[in-house]
Amino acid sequence: MPTTYEPSRKNVFSGPNSLVDYFNPDKNPPLPMVELPRELNPFYDDNVRVYAKMLTALPATNVKSLPALSLLESGGVLSLDGRPGDEQRFHTVVESSSGSTVTSMAMIARQHGVAKVRAYMSNKVSPTKSKLMRFFGLELALFGGPSQSPPQDPKGGIAKAARDGAEDGVYNPNQYENFANPAAHERWTGKQILEQLPEINVFAAGMGTGGTITGTGKCLKSSRPDMHVIGVCVAPGDKVPGPRPKELLEPVDFEWKDVVDSVEDVTSKTSYTLSMEMCRWGIVSGPSSGFSLQGLYQVLERKKRDGTLHTLRQQNDGKPIECAFLCCDLPFQYVDEYFDKCDPASFRPIVNEHLFKVDQYSYSSTWILDFSAAMTMLVYPRFPLGADASAADLPSPSSMPSSPSSSLGGAGPLSPGLLRPAILDLRSRKDFAAEHLDRSCHVPLSSLREDDPSPYDDAALLATQWTELNARFITNAKDVEHRCPQNGVAELAKLPIEEVIACLRTNGREALVVDYDGETAKLACSVLRKAGVKAFSVEGGFKALKDNGCPLVLGSP
């Protein structure tokens, strides 16, 4: 296998090592560097150009997959040089991390034969994040107290992971002290940036473990010793996923102070807001990306105000000041936090937002019968169908006996177990009294009138009708006892609707729902199906039945 990226392979990974090669940066093209447009760069007219290094384009979609790879390699869990390794001697990897680092480790370790990865994480992480980590197969071990503690704290997650790592077959990479962490960014991140932006003047990145800024800054300054490196920390008392406050970085052994020229404190509100703005323009990245960019902008703003912006340009050739920052992860797992942190005016209102609270049950086109299928259901009784009955389960007229039962509504000679469908008529009392199908159960809806539009064209009407249907068919019928007639539907039509629903739910009898035009009946079927009733509607409603010559009862029932 090649040890470096070969364009001739067209970015295709195949064979038994396909995933291993896919995660190996040396066998991939450089990650994109994207210049921010003028709309996102307030210093554009000051001849400053800002580039986003899209570490979100890594296979694991986050910056931490690089140190995860390096950390696992340093411990002997894997080898990236393509040489066959010894038999895997670890059965577990354990790390203190509440996000991208240990999630990346879980993917990579599994590719190399270690299926169990345990994460020590604060009990203050969001439910969404904990579910996401379990989605990736992680075993979570929670701890209380400060969500971010110094490495020396014996009660913190870092110390707990270190104790586990002393056991046979367990490896604790310890991203906070293992120099394989910054080495990953010196090897890959910094190297790529220099190749893509050889005249870079300013670099900004958030500081969590200090590994990213140390490794990338060291590589950049080896070629551009006078460039300005900005380390960005979380403002005191605030929280942004990934980076840490400056006081928690003081005891870190990585040589970040040797490469960082200025340290900026950034708040969560500005981080989330700037991240959201980038996302809306197509630079899809999470809050720590907006965090790094804001740190860069604070330095640029201060130097512009002081009249020293030009000092960031190492050469006096009038070329733009070229800046880069890292896009570290994606925004999706933090969506709830964006709505907490960003100005509510940033989000457009939802039209018909009230519909989130109604009409949440399933629909199926197979529950809508044409006239022929509806008549088959009404005329020919049959054995009860299963709970997932649909129009496809109805027999065709050609398969039925030549003589149906004596009339549409009569009892007829029924075999044991054969049931006629119940007919639920939702129309008004006046219209029902004028004409209806024989043996119908009248269930008038106060919110239904003949000249109403479809509820699917009127959001307010939809909410009103669904609320009424849900109350009658589900809420009010939940604990009602039933008295089910053995045959026919005449007796069923005499029961209160709550008992009718209970009976239909119990004995498997089908229901045909009739309204004026078939629209509200579809809504009713959705509710009835949720209640456990095998309900069907008629396309075109009562009008279609009447126009096609369906036998009706005229006058009062």
Image (spheres, rainbow, N blue to C red):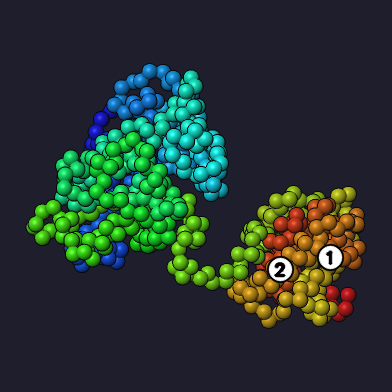
Local SS, label 1: helix
Q: Which of the 4 image quarters holds residue 220?
A: top left
Q: Quadrant of the C terminus?
A: bottom right
Is residue 529 among the parts visible in the rendering?
A: yes
Q: Amino acid at mark 1?
A: Ile
Single out the mark in the foreground, 2 or 1. Answer: 2
Residue to which mark 1 is pinned? 497
Q: Where's residue 204, x and y in %?
A: 28, 51
Q: Earlier in the sequence, mark 2 or mark 1?
A: 2
From mark 2 to mark 1, how far is it between C-alphas? 16 Å
* Mark 1 surroundings: few (<14), some (14-19) or many (≥20) residues within 10 A: some
**Residue at point 15%, 50% (across, down):** 199
Residue to which mark 2 is pinned? 467
Q: Residue furthest left?
A: 317
**Residue at point 64%, 58% (across, down):** 362
Q: Where's residue 495, x and y in %?
A: 89, 64
Q: Amino acid at mark 2?
A: Thr
Nearer the observer, 199 or 156: 156
Q: Which mark is residue 95?
A: none
> Is residue 37 rendered to the left or right of residue 142?
left
* Mark 2 surroundings: few (<14), some (14-19) or many (≥20) residues within 10 A: some
Local SS, label 2: helix
**Residue at point 16%, 60% (across, down):** 310
Is residue 103 among the parts visible in the rendering?
A: no
**Residue at point 52%, 35% (across, down):** 155
